[in-house]
Amino acid sequence: MYWTLAIGLLIMAVILFLAAVTTSTAYRYKHPIDPMSDKRIDQQQTGPKQPQ
């Protein structure tokens, strides 16, 4: 009975440790992004053209 509890707690501790390691690794990852072109920035600032 105690062996089952000890093994269960050990497995749970290993899973918790691995989850913490993978989460901290994911937060440290730097995602590369493409720079926005000047043309696209100008269109966003002026908004879409309205028909007259």
Image: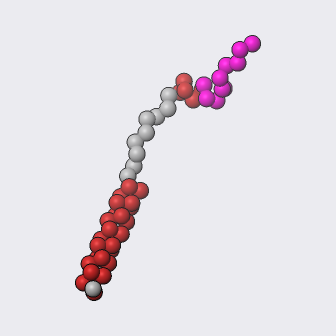
* Residue at 24% across, 84% down: 3
Residue sitting farthest toward the bottom: 2
Q: Give yes or no for residue 46 being in the magenta stretch.
A: yes
Region rendered in magenta: 43-52
Q: Above or below — where is 51 with respect to 39?
A: above
Q: Which residue in the rendered view is the most extreme toward the right?
A: 52
In the figure, is residue 33 to the left or right of 40?
Answer: left
Q: Which residue is rendered at x = 50% and y = 28% of the image?
A: 37
Quadrant of res 9: bottom left
For image coordinates 30% across by 82% down, the residue present is: 5
State the residue in front, 39 or 7: 7
- Where is residue 29? Give x, y as percent: 38, 52
Note whether residue 39 is visible: yes
Q: In the displayed orientation, state which residue is furthest to the front.
A: 1
State the image quarter where residue 20 is shown: bottom left
Q: Nearer the viewer, residue 49 or 42?
A: 49
Using the rendered image of the protein, determine whether residue 17 is visible from the camera's viewpoint. no
Q: Position of residue 46 (x, y in %)?
A: 66, 26
From what the image shows, is residue 10 above or below residue 33? below
Q: Position of residue 39 (x, y in %)?
A: 54, 24
